[in-house]
Image: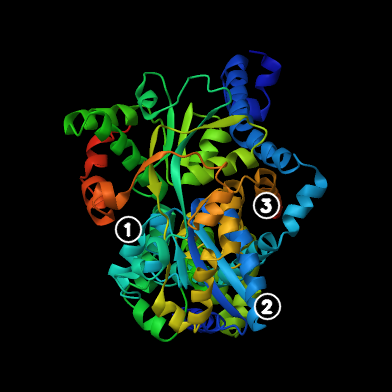
Amino acid sequence: MCPAKATSVKQSATSDPWWTRFVLISIALAFLCAFLILPLLLVFSQALAEGISAYFRALKDPDAIAAIKLTLLVAMAAVPLNTLFGIAVAWSVAKFHFPGKGLVVTIIDLPLSVSPVISGLIYMLLFGAQGYIGPWLIEHNIRIIFALPGIILVTLFVTVPYVARELIPLMQEQGSEEEEAALLLGAGGWRTFFQITLPNIKWGLLYGVIQCNARAMGEFGAVSVVSGHIRGKTNTLPLQVEILYNEYSFAAAFAVASLLAFLALVTLVVKQFIEWQARRREDRAQQEHQA
Amino acid sequence: MAVHSGVRGLVGAIILILGCANFTMAVEMLNVSYDPTREFYEAFNKAFIADWKAKTGETVIINQSHGGSGKQARSVIDGLEADVVTLALAYDIDAIAAKTQWMPPDWQKRLPNNSCPYTSTIVFLVRKGNPKLIKDWGDLVKPGIEVIMPNPKTSGGARWIYLAAWAFAREKFTGDEQKIRAFMAVLFKNVPVLDSGARGSTTTFVQRGIGDVLLTWENEAFLAMEKMKGSPMEIAVPSFSIRAEPPVALIEKMAEKHTTQALAKAYLDHLYSDTGQELAARYFYRPSSPAIAAKHADRFVNVKMCTIDGDFGGWAQAQKIHFDDGGTFDQLYQPGK
């Protein structure tokens, strides 16, 4: 091993020979290319297979526009609600002691470990015509399953963990000293929240929100169960992709899919930006500490 | 925990608002259908809307939902508020009638021709030039032949296919149950994937290029050939097949609830009109009207067919013997072996 290199800080962390590193990195990169980047590029190339005008024609189709609108509407309902819920839960878990706290934290993770199809079926059992309150709902002409409310409900269910999971460790780590100080100095609850808590958690919160949003817009399984697949009415973007694919409109299917792929890319970029911000803040704090 | 109840209240309020927002002024009805009818009903709905407008001056919206026939029936039972259903087989509509009481059990007697405005049959779709020489059911059990078909548990089309194969074997082996079962078992050994619906199987065969032969509805085979001119295929009609009867029905309770009875009834009647029958033929369904069927006789090969009522004692019996849990399909199909 080259002695000059061994003195650098990063180098000293590993003593593996260069070829081990080379092979490992190559395998990792090849894997990434084959299973992540290549399929993503394929989505875009298939979407443009019939030309740019066909691409935009596919996106301007009334059913596609309805799917885009529905997806945005569902995300606009589910994401803010789960953001509020996430903050509330993280706040109570991190700042207070109460019996069953461990249980709460575990239950929040439930939607991540349960198959989305089951999430859909749960609501079917509850609100379906043969379900517990389904007959009453039909009688009163309230539609939940196979309509917008059902789609929002299952989306809420599958996206519950994202904000809360991001915030709980963050808020636990920060403790409640700063809030206590603010309260002692005479600040009210809301003021403490907006001037102390929120600035402290803002990057974690944003991170949770974009992850929540990506899942809300991309969810297929759970939504598929409660959607009813009524064209132009209850099909979200992922369902519309499947329908187009099954109708031999492959270019149109991938054109709609490219919207979701694009959303994923934006999510990644925002995520990177947030991580960069968080690192910068940490470095600054460290420098201040040293000074 | 005040925030919690606040959030819950908000959720409740939103559900209520959205629930009520479903009331709309324009008259709408919903047709819940099975997989391969997408193109046909798109064209038929346009024709019907124009016809209804000319007759009544009323502009209506027909909503469509498509999927595997069994799955669609389940959705209707679970509360997908269909005014009419147009499914792949009578058994799925029987299930709706039995589980919901939203329609009379003898629904199939209310419209002509067993409530089937159009019929179809099961044919083979093979690669151009038929390189593996697959011409009849007997060719499907030869070694090295890959057969693509959907899953009889979820797909109506697949149940027709299964019964057609069974009827062929019954005739060939003159009713020897052991030999029929052996034939079916070998046939399923040649099936590498069972998709959940007819359309899924078509994409497996056509788009992904898997398999030597696709067993499917005649209308689906024609449509795949028309849509996918890029991948050359041809239809092989076996010596013997089944008369596939996809029925239509009014879900009375739902039409009553939506006050769409007259509209929904006219919609189903229109399927039997000359316009409806012409469109059915245009989308490769065999019309029930003898006059229109004769006009398109060149399109549909005359093939010897068995029927569900004549040869299998009706759907209730066929379903029980072959497709319910523990039925012959479960006994004969062993994936991965």
Task: Give the side of residue A291 with respect to residue A185, left or right.
Answer: right
Q: Amino acid at mark 1?
A: Tyr
SS of the residue under disc 2:
helix
Residue A219 seen: no
Q: Amino acid at mark 3?
A: Val
Give the quarter of the image for residue A130: bottom left
Q: Which residue is mark 3?
A: A256
Give the chain of mark 1: B
- Tell us which disc is closer to us: 3 or 2: 2
Disc 3 versus disc 1: distance between alpha carbons? Answer: 36 Å
- Tell us which disc is closer to us: 1 or 2: 2
Disc 3 versus disc 2: distance between alpha carbons? Answer: 36 Å
Residue B160 drawn above or below residue B14: above
Q: Which mark is residue B91?
A: 1
SS of the residue under disc 1:
helix
Q: Amino acid at mark 2?
A: Ala
The residue that appears at 68% across and 78% down in the rendered structure is B54
Asked whether the beta carbons under mark 3 and mark 1 sit within 8 Å of each other, the answer is: no
Give the chain of mark 2: B
From this viewpoint, which residue is outermost toward the top?
Answer: A1
Disc 1 versus disc 2: distance between alpha carbons? Answer: 36 Å
Label 1 and label 2 in one chain: yes
SS of the residue under disc 3:
helix
- Which quarter of the image is occupied by the N terminus of chain B? bottom left
Task: Give the side of residue A5 with respect to residue B105, left or right.
Answer: right
- Which quarter of the image is occupied by the C terminus of chain B? top left
Nearest to N terminus: mark 1 or mark 2: 2
Q: Position of residue A3 (x, y in %)?
A: 67, 15
Q: Which residue is mark 2?
A: B54
Q: Position of residue A17 (x, y in %)?
A: 59, 15
